[in-house]
Amino acid sequence: MTNAHTRIVYLIKSFGSSAALSGLNLGGVELNTAERAARRILATSPYRESACNILMQILEIQGNKAEALIAFEKIRALLKKELGVSLGSLLLEAHKKLLQK
């Protein structure tokens, strides 16, 4: 992979993260856009915990708590199986908040 290609991939992922976060902050109909952006990021970067956190928040706001918990479990299992690591504190805290609601 060339430096230019690496940079383009990085910019696309950064834009996707920005779109997802912006849609989350705007709320309303933008939540659908944010959800699609977060899912696209996870499709290309399945280990990205920040995208999963955004997706979980979006799903919770949309009233899809079960789906948010499924997203959490998918990344938890993936990180454990593929990398042998545990989730970071950001997702663990998001999971805890979901369970308390």
Image (tube, rainbow, N blue to C red):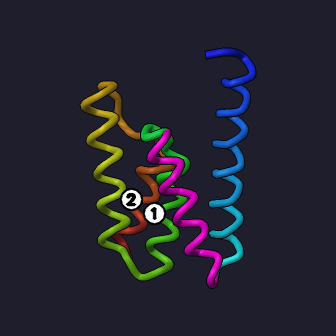
- The tag on residue 56 is 1
For the stretch drawn in magenta, the main secondary structure is: helix
Give the camera-side residue of 82 and 86.
Answer: 82
Please state the horizontal and vertical placement of residue 25, each as a whole percent of the image: 69, 71
Q: Secondary structure at mark 1?
A: helix
- Tag 1 near tag 2, CB within 8 Å: yes
- The tag on residue 95 is 2
Q: Which residues are magenta?
A: 28-44
Quadrant into which the C terminus falls: bottom left
Q: Quadrant of residue 63?
A: bottom left
Quadrant into which the N terminus falls: top right
Residue under the point 62% across and 83% down:
29
Q: Residues within 10 Å of mark 1 (few under 14, many from 20)?
A: many
Q: Secondary structure at mark 2?
A: helix
How many marks the image carries: the answer is: 2
Q: Is residue 4 inside the magenta stretch?
A: no
